[in-house]
Image (cartoon, rainbow, N blue to C red):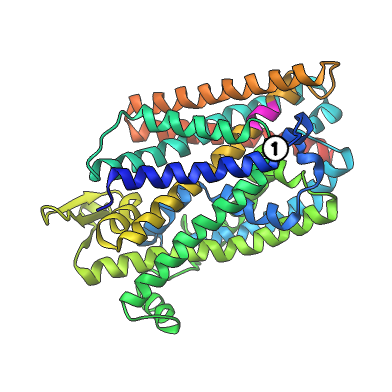
Amino acid sequence: MLSPLVILSIVVGYFTLLCLISRWTSQQADNQTFFRGNRDSKWYLVAFGMIGTSLSGVTFISVPGWVATSQFSYMQMVLGYLLGYAVIAFILLPLYYRMGLTSIYTYLETRMGPRAYQTGAGFFLLSRTIGASFRLYLVAIVFQFILEKAGWTPPFALPVALSIAAIYLYTYRGGIRTVVFTDTLQTFFMLASVGLTVAWIARDMSSQGAGMIEAIQQSSYSQIFFWESGPKNFFLQCLSGAFIAIVMTGLDQDMMQKNLTCRNLKEAQWNMMSFSSVLVIVNLGFLALGALLYLYGHQQGILEESTSSGTFQLLVQDKGTGEMIARGTDYLFPILAIDYLPAWVGLLFILGLVAAAYSSADSALTALTTSFCIDFLRLDSTQTKAAEASRIRQRVQLGFCLVLFATICVFQQLQNAAIIAQIFKAAGFTYGPLLGLYGFGMFT
């Protein structure tokens, strides 16, 4: 069992590394560095870092657990992402680069006026604030669970506050330029965590290489394509994936801001298409990890699956008492990594969890700050002196830190998964009007 001191040392050491990167990337930084990265980012760094941003801590925790109920059907949606990313690369990116945008919502002002412009930006601020808070909240719950198992029970708000403060410290000067580099590092740690865990489980089960693939194929978890009518239908999932990619990447300042730091349109398109191709492989890896975790758990006698009353239930053996306890599928990876796999796998899990959570949180904080400063305060078009503009931007970023912290605390006080999920779902509906605004602007 990992001690609280070891866990704390990992997290502190990790954030120290991020702060060192920030110090290097934020030299002579100004608002243009924060908002646009001086338009000199290497496309391959942006592409690799976007993998971590698009996956987030929710994917890191949840996707492996989905395998028991959804098999590999999620890959149908991932294939749909490819269509959506192609639309972004060859329709939206040329538009954004031709107009020289910093905030993508400036297009709405040019095409339809200030009211549509601020409506679109307002939808983004609302959805991204709730979305980023929700993702950090879910990760905080799992992290709290790990700390409790290690024998330390700090107040829920303490690690949340420290995490948000750390994100502010390494992004407040360099902004998106720093995020391009830190997200590259965080994506590496996240993928290394998954890859090495898969390798160890495969070795322990004596099913390396082709044997591992065969074990997954012969299991009940491996079905990818579903042609019958229903929510898993291939065409429905693929089409949904295409639209999700367009609205949650192409019309999202958070996801597009890094793309707009590339030196030119061609490099931005290379970034988008290479990122989308690698993302397919990465998601397949997460699903393979889920299948292996279930197979390993059954082989070791520490997992049971129940469908009593027509509802799926995962039962996991408590290492202390030996009793089978009902858990949500989100706990599959955390429990096995911390309790039943070697200590170094647990260390990798914590490192991967932190990396997955903050690779999306740091870019979200930067994008929220950028959108508010550009779309509402108009810092890019005013005569405000550079030093004063930087102070305003830093205050705005600090304000969004407080908003994220307060929102997460509200979620924690609710302690009702159904209500919180509905709030998150309602925030997602704001992408529909955004799609309508852009569609109306581009095709009429």
The correct choice, above or below, for 223 with respect to 138 in the image is below
Q: Residue at x 12, y 54 (%)?
A: 323
Judge whether residue 67 can be spotted in this image: yes
Left or right for 360, reference 108: left
**What residue did someone put label 1 on?**
26
Q: Which structural element holds mark 1?
A: loop
Q: Nearer the viewer, residue 61 or 439?
A: 61
Q: Is residue 72 above or below residue 154?
A: below
In terms of depth relative to the viewer, which is nearer, 104 or 207? 207
Depth check, front residue: 170 or 76: 170
On the image, the x and y values in percent for residue 306 come to 22, 58
Q: Say whether residue 199 is left or right of residue 298.
A: right
Relative height, residue 265 to residue 376 (above, below)? below
**Residue type, numbered disc 1:** Ser
Looking at the rendering, in which quadrant would you find the C terminus? top right
- Range covered by the magenta-colored residues: 367-371
Q: Is residue 255 magenta?
A: no
Q: Count of labels shown? A: 1
**Residue name at image x 21 percent, y 52 percent:** 309
Horizontal side of 262 relative to 16 (left or right) equals: right
Pinpoint residue 417: horizontal percent, then vertical percent: 35, 35
